[in-house]
Amino acid sequence: MISKKLYFLLLIFALVLIALQLGSGIWLFILKYGLSPAEIVLYFAGNEAEFIMPKSFEGLIETAVPHFLAISLTVFVYAHFLLFTKIISEDKKWLLIFGLFSSAAVDIFSPFGIIYGYEIFAWFKVIAFWSFEMLMGLLLYILFLVFLKAQKELIRKSRR
Amino acid sequence: MKFLVSKNVHANPNFKLLLGFYAFLLLFYFLGDLVYLQHFFGDSPASILSTLKGNEEEFLEPLGLLSLLEHIHISLFLGIMALFTTLAIVLRLELSRGHKGSIIVLSMLSLLIASLSLIATYFLSDIFVYPFFSGTIIWHGVGVYALLLILKELLRKK
């Protein structure tokens, strides 16, 4: 028999650690690209007057490829716990999962649009990045509530 | 947590083969990561400080914040996934609850402390290099220990 308490312990640690991982991602984003779409365009498309080289297709692929795997894996691993809960409706679960994957995809693909001259993709990147971070935050918050509730239930049952 | 098809690691020969090879190759991740960290930061608290803050005598430039954050971002992700999957298998082993609990707390907490201490060493004080150094060794060491327990259980005839 596998102890549910140990399960929850492992899951709580996993939630805290992935929250730290998200924090490092936000910090990196702000430090590297900045907060505004104009700064993002400058970072990717470069500027001759300021001697900033534009990013190459190969350079973008180097960042995009590991992110496709890492983000998909993270969302898959953490969001699958949602399927065992009843804290939100099935429609809301669908929306959350769809939102997470689609915002991640837009975030990763947008820089390619920017280097080919479509500055509108800088807006897409900003909106997609912050949407993804907020949705991940929401997912972790929901899971934390579920685990906390289940843990309390376990303690109540063991006292009876 | 439905990561594994069965709660019994001896459920069928192919399941054992899958878990066995996974544990065996993941051992090389934990050991290889230590070798990588030794190359990146050095093998003592003093050399870690030299890498992070530079060393005039050795003409070493301090590590940029961007490089440090990129390192944390990647290594934390790999550490979480490696420990999370390893510990999901550990939960299925025939060990006492206290033993399993110690493995979970020690490894996950050390990973958390090591990651936070690295940032604290860079921004706050050199003293945090010690929890980073010991935390890193502990979570890698406990990871290896957990994988060896998994392999031992799988090789045991049932």
Image (spheres, coloured by chain):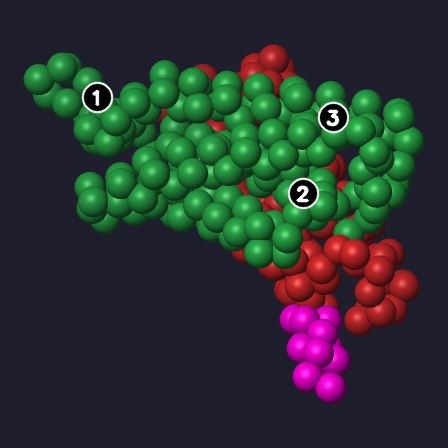
**In the picture, which chain is green?**
B
Q: Which residues are magenta?
A: A148-160
Tell me the CA gap for discs 3 and 1: 49 Å
Q: Earlier in the sequence, mark 3 or mark 1?
A: 1
- Magenta segment's dominant SS is helix
| Chain given the colour red | A
Query: Which residue is found at the position 63% from the left and 56% from the top?
Result: B97
Q: Which mark is residue B90?
A: 2
Image coords of residue B26 (percent x, y): 63, 25
| Badge 2: residue crowd in 10 Å (few <14, some 14–19, many ≥20) | many
Q: What's the amino acid at mark 1?
A: Glu
Residue at numbered disc 3: B155
Indicate the amino acid at tag 3: Leu
User: Residue A27 lies in what quarter of the image?
Assistant: top left
Question: Is residue A35 visible in this depiction of the protein?
Answer: no
In x, y percent, where is residue B145?
Answer: 54, 34
Disc marking residue B61: 1
Subunit under mark 1 = B
